[in-house]
Amino acid sequence: MKTRPSSQPAASAANPPNGDAAGGARLTGLAPVFDDQARLLVLGSFPGAASLQAAQYYAHPRNAFWPVMAALVGEAGLAERPYADRLDALKRHRVALWDAVAACRREGSLDTAIEAAEPSDLPALVARLPALRVIACNGALAHRQTLLALGDAALPVLKLPSTSPAHAGLRLVDKIDAWRTALGRYL
């Protein structure tokens, strides 16, 4: 899956991936990962500290995103594969990834700690995805931010249970079932 350049600067010494939000450092998210054949766009809120540090989507080992996607696209062992292989598998299944928030201030990894959120340019990305059929928001904040950015989208914008380890109210099997029920007809 191609990684497209983001309008946001990458993490660097001048823009640390896990800056001290209380000290005023601004965190910048990851670039979108997509190709123009994507039918499904999965939007998180903003990468957690582990994801920013690794420069990989859903890098926290307890985040259920990769096991959920493995079940949805029928790719056993997806979560254990190298990151580039996971992205290639999503590309084969016409799935794109990004976050609804491009930059923010945050201490830790919780969505509730996000301050001064700068929205991602979702209208521009959606315009580059002519085959897009649905947008899946990974959690409530991603859903709210997406609706703010897209307004009355011509596509379904679905709020799905967060795959974050902080959202421990649902078992993995229940998260998989909820995502499969919502997205099965689009995959």
Image: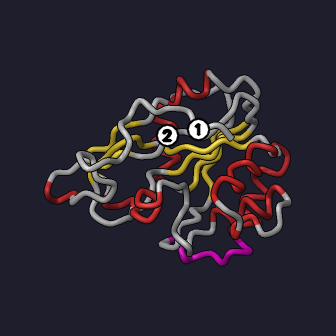
Disc 1 marks a residue whose amino acid type is Thr
Q: Is residue 170 magenta?
A: yes
At which x and y percent is residue 177?
A: 77, 66
Determine which quarter of the picture holds residue 116: top left
Question: For the residue carrying disc 1, how many other residues have a C-alpha within 10 Å: few (<14), some (14-19), or many (20+)?
Answer: some
Magenta span: predominant SS is loop
Name the residue nearer the viewer: 22 or 89: 89
In the picture of the structure, the residue carrying the numbered disc 1 is 3
Give how far apart the Cα atoms at labels 1 and 2 are.
7 Å
Q: Considering the numbered disc 2 on the image, is that residue within a helix, a strand or a loop?
A: loop
**Residue occupying image coordinates x 66% and y 41%:** 96
Say left or right for 98 vs 75. left
Q: Is residue 112 magenta?
A: no
The quarter in which the C terminus is drawn is top right
**Residue occupying image coordinates x 60% and y 51%:** 159
**Residue occupying image coordinates x 54% and y 77%:** 168
Q: Residue furthest left?
A: 23
Query: Considering only vertical position in the picture, is 14 above or below 38?
Result: below
Name the residue nearer the viewer: 19 or 43: 19
Name the residue nearer the viewer: 38 or 111: 38
Query: Considering only vertical position in the picture, is 96 above or below 76?
Result: above
At which x and y percent is residue 130?
A: 72, 23
| Dots 1, 2 in contact, CB < 8 A | yes
Disc 2 marks a residue whose amino acid type is Ala
Question: Which residues, given as a range, are shown in magenta?
Answer: 167-174
Q: Which mark is residue 31?
A: 2
Say left or right for 71 vs 86. right
Name the residue nearer the viewer: 156 or 164: 164
